[in-house]
Structures are given as C-alpha cells and as structure tokens.
C-alpha cells in the first residue's frame, strides 16, 4: 500500500511553517491550522449568530443559545450553583472538542482530537484546573477526598492507594477515550473507503453503503464524545467542590 | 503510527495551549456574556409580561367586583324605594278609611237621632188623635163631656199596657 493510501496517513503531522522558539519546536502544523480554524469557527458562530440579540431567536441564534443552555444545564445538574463560575471553561472545552470532532468529518480535513497528545493536553488541563479548584477551596481537607468514609481502618490501607491511583488515572482515561474513538472511526472510514476503490464497480457498493452508515454514526460519536468529555469534566469539578463520592 | 511520533508533541501542545487560551478568552469575554445577556433579557421580558398580565387580570376582576357591588346597591335602593312607597300608600289609605268610617258613623248617629225624634213625634201625634177619637166616641156613647185630662190619662194607661 502506498504511503498516501495508508489508513493512518490522514493522521500525519505536516509542518506548514517551521518555527523554533528557544530550541523548542513550535512549528505551525496542519494540526495547528485546524485548531485555529475550530477556534475561529466557534467564535464566529457564537458572535455572528448573536449579533441581532433578537428577542425571538432565528435558526442560528437558537443553535447558539441551545449550546449555551446545554452546558449551563449540565453544569447546574452535576455541580450545582457553585459551578456557574467555571461555565466559560467547561463551555470552551465542550465547544473545542465538538468543533474539532465535527470539522474532522469534512473530507481531506485533519482531526485534531485524533491525536493522543492533544486529547491528553486537554484532559490534563481539566485535571489540573479541577485539582487546583479543590485545593484552593478546601486546602488540606482536599486530601480527605482520598479517604472513603465509613470504612474499617484496615481496609483504608488498600483503599487509599486505589483512590489515589483512580484519581490520577482520570486524565488518561479521559484523553484515551476521546482519542481512541476518533482514531478508530476515522481509520475505519479510510479502510472502507479504500475497499470501495479496490472493489470498484463490481463489489464496491457494499462497503459504500457501510461507509455511508458509518459517517452518520461518526457524527453521533463526534457529538457524544464532546458530551462525555464535558460531563466528565463537570463530575470531576463536582468532586473537587463537594468532596464526596 | 503518527500519534506516537514524539517530535510532533511540542508543536501540538504549544498550539493547543495558544488556541485554547484564545478560545477561552473569546468565550469568557465576548460570547458567553452576550448569550447570557440575551437569555436574561428574554427571561426578564417574559416575567414582566406575565406580571403585566396578572396585574391587568386583577384590575379587570376588581372592575367586575365594583360593577357587581354597584348593581347590588342600585337593586337594594330600588327595593327600598318600592317598600317605602307601598308603606306610604298603605298609610294614606288607612287614614282616609278611618276618616270615612268616622264620617259614616257620625252620619248614622245623626240619622238615628232624627229617626228617634220623628218616632217620638209620630207617637205623640198618634196619642193626640187617639184622644180626640176616644173623646168623640165616648161622648157619642155616654153623652158626657169628658175632661181632656182624664182622657189623656186613660190613653196613657192603655198605651202603657200595649206599647
């Protein structure tokens, strides 16, 4: 199989502008380009659709309001009123993941979230932010989060390390879930796309039908993974604010 | 696998940081306040409209109650006027009846008196005629001239026995 037709070729990082800052490679890559596109698309969508500030919203304004209320309700249900302060953060995370996933569905585009380092970066940002919120709110009492209540002392010896490990595994599970979903979906689409070409007019219809259905599923996954990422961030935030399981 | 090419990690992380920071600032400073403002003003507008509707409905309820009270009052007043009128008419009728009765009583008393007088007069006339007749009869039978006083006494005595 030629290099360009490998199912993984779509994930190749290409340096569009070589940049170097004090020995650190900060090149503007195709990944950077699509991150910038996603940020621009989100900002344009939310500001352009709200430009009328209409009392009765039109289609675009409804979508913008819907995405706002979606995250606002998620935050209210999972964190409560204390969560309002962190709304812009959770909203940015959700919109960034959602737009990166959706823009990745455009043929010949690049899926930013199909790279473990990007999803890990986001998950680590969530993890660090949430942990800092917990520490600033509760100080040393935050450590009581790792001690389950109502458990015999002897069991604590086992449970406390488990709690600590499960806490630090959070950013990994959060990032791998999103990365694996994107990687698998896009690889599968590429593989079946190659089958369509390979089997040509005689046998290509079956994989074509499959790839059509898969495209629909991938749009669902694109939204669902953004939702999962945002709601898990909310749950972690809730743990940090309320310190209970 | 391109995802595991460690040389690609720094530029991705750096640009993720840059773009996410820009996005966060754009959301926190522009997009979120703008949407929140629109949603809040809509909420306010709906609340205000509901308040206004409530106020108007209360007002109309009050107007209805006022109207009903006025109607009730007018009805009561009309009723009072009718009873008063009935009472005064009854009183007037009573007064005129009493007067009439008194008048009639007076008249009948007067009539009785004059009847009695007429009766007395008639009776005395009868006696006189009886006396004259008795005198004439007796003088024809016994040819004695009776004194008028005696005849009168005899008539009186016989009248007493009959009348």
Image (cartoon, grey):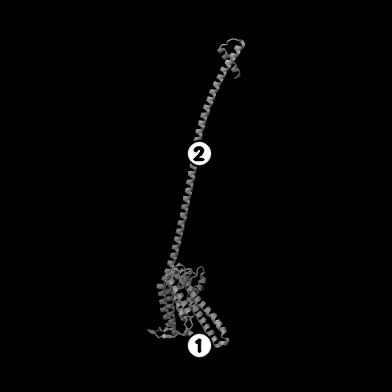
Q: Residue furthest front?
A: B140
Specify whether B27 is left or right of B103.
left
Q: How many marks?
A: 2
Gap in angstroms between the C-alphas marked 2 and 1: 120 Å
Q: In the picture, residue B115 is in which quadrant? A: top right
Specify whether B15 is left or right of A181.
left
Mark 2 or 1, closer to the camera: 2
Protein chain holding label 2:
B
- Judging depth in this view, the residue of A245 and A15 nearest the camera is A15
The residue lying at 48 percent from left, 49 percent from top is: B72
Judged from the image, the secondary structure of the residue bearing numbered disc 1 is: helix
Labels 2 and 1 positioned on one and the same chain: no
Residue A145 point in image, percent of width and height: 47, 70
Q: Where does the C terminus of chain B fall, quadrant-wise?
A: top right
Q: Residue furthest bottom?
A: A2
The residue lying at 47 percent from left, 76 percent from top is: A98
**Residue identifier under label 2:** B90
Residue A15 point in image, percent of width and height: 42, 85
The residue lying at 42 percent from left, 85 percent from top is: A16
Residue A183 point in image, percent of width and height: 50, 81
Please indicate, yes or no, whether residue A2 appears anywhere in the rendered image.
yes
Residue A245 point in image, percent of width and height: 50, 70
The residue lying at 54 percent from left, 23 percent from top is: B118
- Judging depth in this view, the residue of A30 and A237 nearest the camera is A30
Judged from the image, the secondary structure of the residue bearing numbered disc 2 is: helix
**Residue identifier under label 1:** A5
- Judging depth in this view, the residue of B87 and A38 nearest the camera is B87
Q: Residue furthest left?
A: A22
């Amino acid at each position: 199989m030629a290099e360009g037709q490998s199912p993984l070729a779509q994930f190749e990082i290409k340096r569009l502008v070589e940049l170097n800052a004090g020995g650190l490679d900060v090149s503007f890559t195709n990944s950077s380009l699509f991150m910038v596109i996603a940020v621009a698309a989100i900002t344009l969508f939310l500001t352009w659709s709200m430009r009328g500030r209409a009392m009765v919203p039109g289609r675009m304004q409804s979508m913008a309001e819907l995405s706002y209320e979606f995250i606002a309700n998620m935050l209210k249900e999972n964190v409560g009123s204390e969560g309002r302060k962190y709304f812009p953060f959770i909203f940015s995370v959700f919109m960034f993941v959602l737009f990166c996933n959706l823009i990745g569905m455009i043929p010949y585009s690049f899926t930013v979230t199909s790279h473990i380092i990007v999803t890990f970066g986001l998950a680590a940002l969530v993890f660090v932010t949430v942990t800092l919120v917990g520490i600033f709110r509760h100080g040393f009492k935050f450590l009581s989060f790792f001690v389950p209540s109502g458990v015999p002392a002897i069991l604590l010896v086992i449970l406390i390390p488990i709690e600590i490990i499960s806490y630090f595994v959070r950013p990994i599970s959060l990032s791998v879930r999103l990365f694996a979903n994107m990687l698998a979906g896009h690889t599968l689409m590429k593989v079946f796309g190659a089958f369509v070409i390979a089997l040509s007019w005689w046998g290509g219809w079956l994989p074509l039908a499959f790839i059509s259905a898969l495209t629909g599923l991938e749009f669902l996954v694109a939204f669902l993974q953004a939702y999962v990422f945002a709601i898990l961030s909310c749950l972690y935030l809730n743990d940090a604010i309320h310190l209970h399981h | 696998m391109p995802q595991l090419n460690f040389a690609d990690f720094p530029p991705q992380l750096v640009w993720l940081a840059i773009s996410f920071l820009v996005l966060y600032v754009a959301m926190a400073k522009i997009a979120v306040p703008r949407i929140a403002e629109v949603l809040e003003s809509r909420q306010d507008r709906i609340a205000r409209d509901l308040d206004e509707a409530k106020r108007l409905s209360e007002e109309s309820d009050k107007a209805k109650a006022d109207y009903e009270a006025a109607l009730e009052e007018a009805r009561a007043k009309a009723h009072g006027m009718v009873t008063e009128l009935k009472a005064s008419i009854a009183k007037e009728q009573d007064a005129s009846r009493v007067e009439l009765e008194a008048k009639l009583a007076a008249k009948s008393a007067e009539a009785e008196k004059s009847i009695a007088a007429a009766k007395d007069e008639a009776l005395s006339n009868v006696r006189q005629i009886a006396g004259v007749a008795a005198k004439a009869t007796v003088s024809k039978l016994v040819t004695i001239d009776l004194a008028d006083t005696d005849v009168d006494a005899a008539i009186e005595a016989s009248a007493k026995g009959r009348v």
